[in-house]
Amino acid sequence: MFKIVLTGVLLFVCYDGNASVIACKQFYQQLDDTVKKEQVLDNQFARIKNFPYLRVNRFWASFAKEDLSASQFDFWLQQLQALAMQAWQIEYANLPIERQYRIRQQLPAFAKQHNLTVIATLEQCSQLLKQADFEEQDKRQLLQQQAIVPDVYSTQKRVLGLHEITKYGIHIAIGRKYKVLSKPYQMPLEEVPVSGKLIRYDHRLANTLRLNANQVSAILAQSSQNPLAVPQPNSKDLNDLFMTFAPVWEVDTVFDKDDRIGTPFWSEVDNLPDVNVSKPKVYQLLSYTRFQQQILLQLNYLVWFPGNTLKKKLIDLEGGRMSGVIWRVTLAPNGKPLVYDTIHQCGCFHMFYPSKVLTALPPTDDIGELGLAPQQDTDFADNARLVLRIAYRTHYVDYVYEYKPRDVETVYYQFADYKQLRSLPYIAGRRSLFRAKDGVVEGSERLMDWVMWPMGVTELGAMRQWGMHATAFTGKRHFDEARLMERYYIWNK
């Protein structure tokens, strides 16, 4: 009734007719129904209708409408498979133990016959369905039409909130906020206010294990030898890159409760996420951008604070549980940073630090937020280590400067993979830091949303998952857009 074909490390079990394909589709549907019912859906990559074994993010979606060669399409398809496998593994791990048991009982007959795990079965099914689907040209066209990532803005909220009218008042408020954010950059570093004690967070090896620009360039070139020229360094090279460009976090520490970097966890006290400041971690995440026919690698460094809860005012729109900052380094093919940018984990306060080879585009008539570049002196030495001065309580990035020793307390952090946050220990099982319905960190909501809900962002001001960061409020902008930099800069190569 069936035959076994061994290909690499994968075992394909081929049934007569379409039995194997039908069994796999049913298994995906059963697993998907369970994931949704148990509310463990992972939002980092978008599902693709009719293709349960594929998912997509904004970078890979940017290729969907392009005229790809056969080899380019196959390579692109492999990336969508990899995103889906990563997400399915996380969702399955986050299911309650009894649900995992039921899923194992629902494995297709061929999987039970050969004692395959759930994950191994998904790998088999991914290959089987891909092979069946793309024997037909029309399935390729269907995929390219449906491989999209919806924006995170609510049209309904914008209509109800009379967005086309209210956005003008918000635009003025944002302009005032940008002036506040820019103020520290207009003074010498020595005059930037320090209200508490400066504490540096550094990695013990970051000053010694560093690559020069030529070495970085070689890694980027060598790892781009694929049909779409996307840099995909091996694990060792990627670790070296993250170490080379790791910033020092210099935090103005007034409140031990809020101003220390830590590790997120699920608290058994109130059943909400919290941050353990005795274990400081910097989370790493790899991303890409497209800029003037080039595909550029981006290194993202993410930190978390317990919160911004010690209010200075009776009504504090920004105050709340948990806080965090994302620092991103975009590398040019020559091995040097092309631009740095940063946001809070809510998507707020997007700021750029461009290198001198970039020229800012002139403002347009659109009142959507401009690219705020508050620091004029960004002529840093090639691949210099940078120090990020972080304000107390608000955790604004107040200044960026080249590393130099200082007589301040230093705390050493560990690196961690951002994927860990999508499946944290929780009671007798595991649970994502991020809420299934919208990617928001439960309990981190802000009063800001009461004022700015007409801008259409769900729980505006709350911390949220990668891929869910709306960074503009009068227009539309996402932190992970594939061509974000082209909105604001020309690259003078």
Image: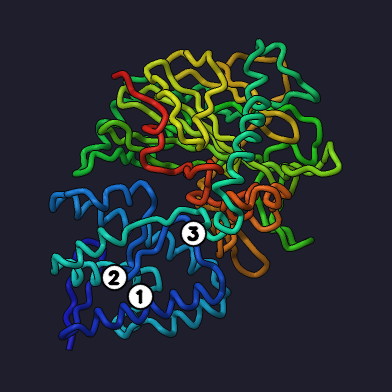
What residue is shown at x 25% (from left), y 67% (from top)? 127
Q: Position of residue 176 (x, y in %)?
A: 66, 29
| Lower sequence index among marks 1 and 3 | 3
Q: Is residue 280 above or below residue 443?
A: above
Q: Which residue is mark 3?
A: 43
From the viewer's perspective, is 312 left or right of 472?
A: right
Q: Amino acid at mark 1?
A: Leu
Q: Position of residue 427 (x, y in %)?
A: 68, 67
Q: Which quadrant: the C terminus? A: top left
- The numbered mark at residue 371 is none
Residue matched to label 2: 124
Q: Nearer the viewer, residue 27 or 166?
A: 166
Per the image, label 3 sits on a secondary structure element best described as: loop
Q: Secondary structure at mark 2?
A: helix
- Residue at 59% x, 63% y is 431
The answer to whether residue 433 is visible is no
Q: Cβ–Cβ below 8 Å for labels 2 and 1?
A: yes
Few, some or many C-alpha atoms within 10 Å of disc 1 (few <14, some 14-19, many ≥20)?
some
Q: Height in image: 253 above or below 132?
A: above
Cα distance, mark 1 to mark 3?
27 Å
Pointer 3 local density, CA inside 10 Å: few below 14, some 14–19, many at least 20 = many
Crowding near the residue tagged with mark 2, few <14, some 14–19, many ≥20 C-alpha atoms within 10 Å: some
Q: Which residue is mark 1?
A: 116
Is 415 placed left or right of 125 in the picture? right
Q: Residue furthest front?
A: 165
Hey, what amino acid is under mark 3?
Asn
Q: N-terminal of the two: label 2 or label 3?
A: 3
**Mark 1 touches mark 3? (CB < 8 Å):** no
